[in-house]
Amino acid sequence: MSSLSATPDPRASSAGPVEGSIREKLTAALQPIDLGITNDSWQHRHHAAMRAQGGGSGETHFSIQVVSEAFRGKTTMQRHRMIYSALSDELSQGLHALSLKTKTPEESQKEAAA
């Protein structure tokens, strides 16, 4: 994962406003060493909830990988709550699901060495 990288929907040419807002808010809240955001929305357009929204905005499901010192001493649940709190506006306005991987720098280094 490269620093502050993003992998967009393979059919999209650039990040949309929700992805940009996620990046901005998580960068401000967590000052990440690494932040990877993948828009997975295209994989979920057939779900009933997304069909009801006409396929959604195209920015409803994201995978987020964050490496941050802010996670030091926090449980996985506490880390996820930090992210959900930072993105509360987006979640109330159509962001439907997040897949989160949250690590401290040491955890990330240990995983990379394995």
Image (cartoon, grey):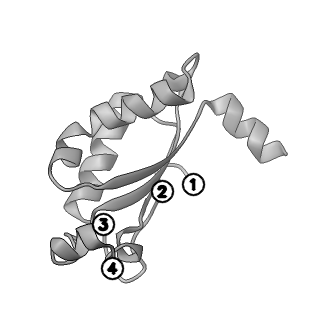
Q: Of callouts 4 and 1, which one flags the residue occurring earlier in the amino acid sequence?
A: 1
Q: Residue at x 39, y 30 (%)?
A: 81
Q: Of callouts 3 and 1, which one flags the residue occurring earlier in the amino acid sequence?
A: 1
Dots 3 and 1: beta carbons under 8 Å? no
Q: Residue at x 31, y 76 (%)?
A: 45
Instruction: Tell me where residue 69 appears, x and y as whole percent.
Output: 54, 25
Residue 28 higher or lower than 113, as above or below: above
Query: Quick one: quadrant of the N terminus?
Result: bottom right
Mark 2 or 4, closer to the camera? 4
Query: Quick one: quadrant of the C terminus?
Result: top right
Query: Could you tell me how far apart the alpha carbons at marks 4 and 1 are, in whole angstroms?
Result: 31 Å
User: Dividing the picture into quarters, in which one does residue 18 lie?
Assistant: bottom left
Secondary structure state at the residue bearing disc 3: loop
Q: Please give the residue where the numbered disc 3 appears in the rendered image.
A: 15
Query: Could you tell me how far apart the alpha carbons at marks 3 and 1 are, in whole angstroms?
Result: 17 Å
Q: Is residue 31 visible?
A: no
Instruction: Tell me where residue 73 appears, x and y as whole percent.
Output: 58, 16
Amino acid type, label 1: Ser
The residue most toward the right is 114
Amino acid type, label 4: His
Q: Quick one: label 1, few (<14), some, or many (20+) residues within 10 Å?
A: few
Q: Please give the residue where the numbered disc 2 appears in the rendered image.
A: 5
Q: Residue at x 35, y 61 (%)?
A: 61
Amino acid type, label 3: Ala
Secondary structure state at the residue bearing disc 4: loop
Amino acid type, label 2: Ser
Residue 2 badge: 1
Mark 4 or 1, closer to the camera? 4
Q: Please give the residue where the numbered disc 4 appears in the rendered image.
A: 46
Instruction: Tell me where residue 106 appears, x and y as whole percent.
Output: 70, 29
